[in-house]
Image: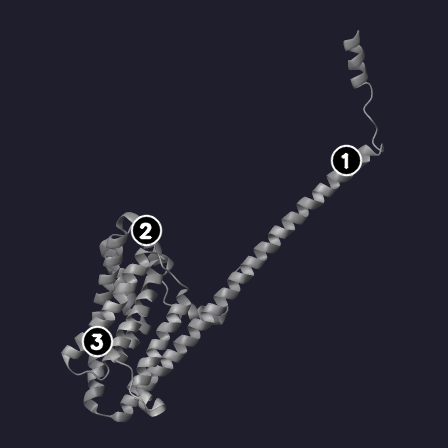
Amino acid sequence: MKKITPFLFISNIFAHELTKADQAEMVDGGLLDYMYLGAKHMVTGYDHILFLIGVIFFLTKLSDIVKFVTAFTIGHSITLIFATFYKVTANYYLIDAVIALSVIYKGFENLDGFKQVFNRNAPNLIMMVLFFGLIHGFGLSTRLQQLPLKDESLLASIISFNVGVELGQVLALLIAFPFIRIIQKSKNNLFSKVTNLGLVLCGIGLFIFQITGYIEDKNHVDEHQEIHTESMESQDTHIHDDGAVHQNHNSDDRDGSSPEPTGHSHDGENYHTH
C-alpha cells in the first residue's frame, strides 16, 4: 500500500491538481464544461495569481495593465494549446517549481533587487512576462492532459479550456486589483516592501513544496517498481524450484530407482507378431 508522508500530502495540495471528481465529470464533458474547469483552475491557481499580482503591482494605467496581461496571456496560450495538442508533457511538480521561481523573480524585481544586489537594471519586463507566461501555460497543459481528452474534439476542448483560463484570470485580477490600489494610494513604502517580500517568501515556500513533492513522488515510484521487481523474481524462483523437483523425478526414472512398467510393450509386440 502506498505510504503518504506529510510532505507529500502538503505538496499535493500546493500542486492544485485536477481532482478525481473533476476528471470523472469530464469523461462526457462538453465545451462549456472545459471552459468552466479552466476558469476554476485559474481562480484557484494561487501561483499564477501571485505572479500576476507582482506584474501589475506598480502599474496605474489601464493601458499598461492590458499590455502586460496580454503578454502573459499570449505566452500561456501558446504552450497550453500546442503542448496539449501535440501531447508534450513533463513532471508537473518540476513545472510548478519553475512557476514558483517566477513568483520569486517578480517579488525580487519589485523590491528593486537587481539594483540593490547586482547593481544593474532588471531585464526587459515585457519579455520576462512573456517568457514566464510560456512556463505557466506548460503548467496548465500538464493539468489539462490529466483529463480524458477525445481526439475528435481535442482542439475545441483545448481552446475552451484556454478561454476559461482567460475568464478566470480576469476574475482573479478584478478581485485582487482593489487591494493593490489601496496599497498604491497609501504611498506607504514599507507596506509595499512587506507585500513584495511576502511574494518572495510565498514563492520560496511553493518551490520547496514542489521539489519535496517531486522527490517524494519519485521515491514512491521507485519503491513500487522495486516491489514489483521483487515479486517477479519471487515468481521466477518458484517456477525454477518446481522445475528442479520435476527434474529430480526424471533423474530417478533414468537411474532405475523407479520401477519400469512391465508387460505392455512386450505384450503388444507379441500380439502383433502373432
Real-space CA distance between mark 2 and mark 1, rounded to the nearest whole angstrom = 57 Å
**Mark 1 highlights which residue?**
250
273 lies left or right of 83: right
Q: Which mark is residue 27?
A: 2
Tell whether label 3 touches label 1 (CB within 8 Å).
Answer: no
Residue 93: which quarter of the image? bottom left
Going by the numbered disc 3, the residue's amino acid type is Phe
> Is residue 3 at all visible to an observer of this figure?
no
Judged by depth in the image, the label closer to the viewer, 2 or 1, is 1
> Is residue 159 at all visible to an observer of this figure?
yes
**Mark 3 highlights which residue?**
68
Outermost residue on the top side: it is 274
Q: Quadrant of the C terminus?
A: top right
Q: Residue at x 32, y 51 (%)?
A: 27
* Helix, strand or loop at mark 1: helix
Q: Quadrant of the N terminus?
A: bottom right
Q: Residue at x 37, y 73 (%)?
A: 98
Q: Residues within 10 Å of mark 1 (few under 14, many from 20)?
A: few
* Helix, strand or loop at mark 3: helix
Real-space CA distance between mark 1 and mark 3, rounded to the nearest whole angstrom = 82 Å
Going by the numbered disc 2, the residue's amino acid type is Val
Residue 229's x, y, as percent? Answer: 59, 55
